Image (spheres, rainbow, N blue to C red):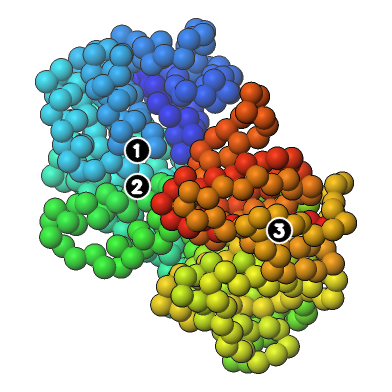
Amino acid sequence: MEVTVVGLGAMGGGMARSLLRSSTITRVSGFDLSEKLVSSFYEESKKAGKATEKLPSDLKLQNFVSSDTDVVLIVLVNEAQCQYTCFDGDASLESIMKEGSCVIVSSTVSAGWSKSAFQRFSKKNIQFCDCPISGGAARALKGEISIFCSGEPSSLKFIDPLLQAMGKEIHIVPGGAGMGSTVKMVHQLLAGVHIVVAAEALALAAKAGLDVNQMYDIVKGAAGNSWMFSDRGQRMIENPDKKVLSALAIFIKDMDIVYSEAKRLQSPIPLASAALQQFISGASLGLSKEDDSTVVRVYEAITGVSVNQSQSKFKEGDNVGEYWVLSDGTKEKIVEVGEEVRHQVVLSNEYTRVLKVKFPPNDTTWAHRHAEDSLYFFLVEGGLNVVNHVKGSDPECDCMEFGEVRYGTHKSDKPLVHRITNKNDTDMFCIDAEILKSPPVTSPLPLIADHHSLIKTRDRCRVYKLVLEPGQSVTVSYPFFHLAIVLKGSKIEKRIGSNAHSISWNKVMEIGDEEWCTPTIDLAISNVGETVFEQFIAEWR
């Protein structure tokens, strides 16, 4: 029997290699869009005496599936890739496979797609088996995966040598093609929920101040354990983002299949729906290509405590990586302000780092540490009310007016470690501009210019406010490096140079827009919009 495996990733590569050990499989070729994976498998197949005469130089499916191919095993990422390979590609399996041959799909696809594929292949006298899998890459390589097989009895008998070579637990699911995928769907509901519940439990343990390593050991030997808790829980603690064994995006795809099928059947799945949302939240944190165990970071983003770094001994202190023991006994890890998820770095150079701080009502930041002198520009119209909890002090209410500017001496004096809770009924909005060092050009005297007023002076900076009514203009020279922050937006026209050799441009400026500017001579600024324009000019000294 000659077999071609399409998809040589973690699972497909292991399954293909398990076929090399089978005495009933005479030829095994592997196709993938990765030349490295194809070449590596070809050398192993050649060593096992089961390779084709030579490795095709062109990575096209038709070069790996011939008239002698008896079975094509598909182990691809998703349904769309299976559809393209089987039916929609320039050289689809439907068009190139011989009569009597068989296509096995081991990817996780919907039952409806499997049934449709069976019908289409049957019209070409090509057999089709729906055989999704479970077990992970290590078990695939050993030939010990679980396989959920459905299809015509004669087809399942035809591919039995492959199933025996690849699987330890082979389940024949009656009802024809599509039923194997239905079993996999229900299985993935459990798997996905168990992963998310493992993350939830460990995050709660860490937030409560427990040693998560001890918690993990306790659960493993108790009734609350599951296979996913044992496997993914260990990764959450020891290997949060180094090695990807199963990408988070795969569970978004699988749980979406669960959701769609449950909706069609009108069967309630509240736990699976909640788990899907947590995986989607993980993707929004940029974790799609990371291991699915990194869904724990969704909880870490909320609790402010890192599961993988929660140890039996906590070092309390004021430095990044140390812990703040709160009044209720919970321990929260202190992060550098740029690592706090509500602080987004929007501008960075050798002179400044600018962070945009924006989060909803009643939300609280992680414990974070400011170690650089900073300017704070508060941009909530109507004013802002917060609870500011500084480490070492009781939480205090604080109010900031719209357009208020404050200066924090976090380097000149001492670092600030605190947590902020937004008590407004609108989003918190603030610009945090760190003063890292003095630029090469500074001005000894304050700026005197029309429409500019000096509102704050400190040893490392001066802050001016520029105000232009609609139709007003000003020509100004800024003999210093500065950070410009928009307080009230409008459409602005700027021009540099004389009338004969000038450069001009228009831009709609919005509240919170920031720009780092070098010294400028004779810059003409005009408000060509319909609203008042106000901008902070923060001079670096």
- Return the x and y of residue 34 as percentages of the image width and height: 52, 24
Q: Earlier in the sequence, mark 3 or mark 1?
A: 1
Residue type at mark 3 is Ala
Q: Determine which residue is flagged by label 2.
A: 253
- To which quarter of the image does residue 391 belong? bottom right
Q: Residues within 10 Å of mark 1 (few under 14, many from 20)?
A: some
Does residue 18 appear in the picture of this structure?
Answer: no
Secondary structure at badge 3 equals strand
In front: mark 3 or mark 2? 3
On the rendered image, what quadrant is the N terminus found in? Answer: top left
Report whether 504 appears left or right of 67: right
Q: Are marks 1 and 2 in contact (CB under 8 Å)?
A: yes
Q: Determine which residue is flagged by label 1.
A: 78
Does residue 86 appear in the picture of this structure?
Answer: yes
Q: Residues within 10 Å of mark 3 (few under 14, many from 20)?
A: many
Task: Give the Cα separation between the discs numbered 3 and 2.
Answer: 48 Å
Q: Earlier in the sequence, mark 3 or mark 2?
A: 2
Q: Which mark is residue 538?
A: 3
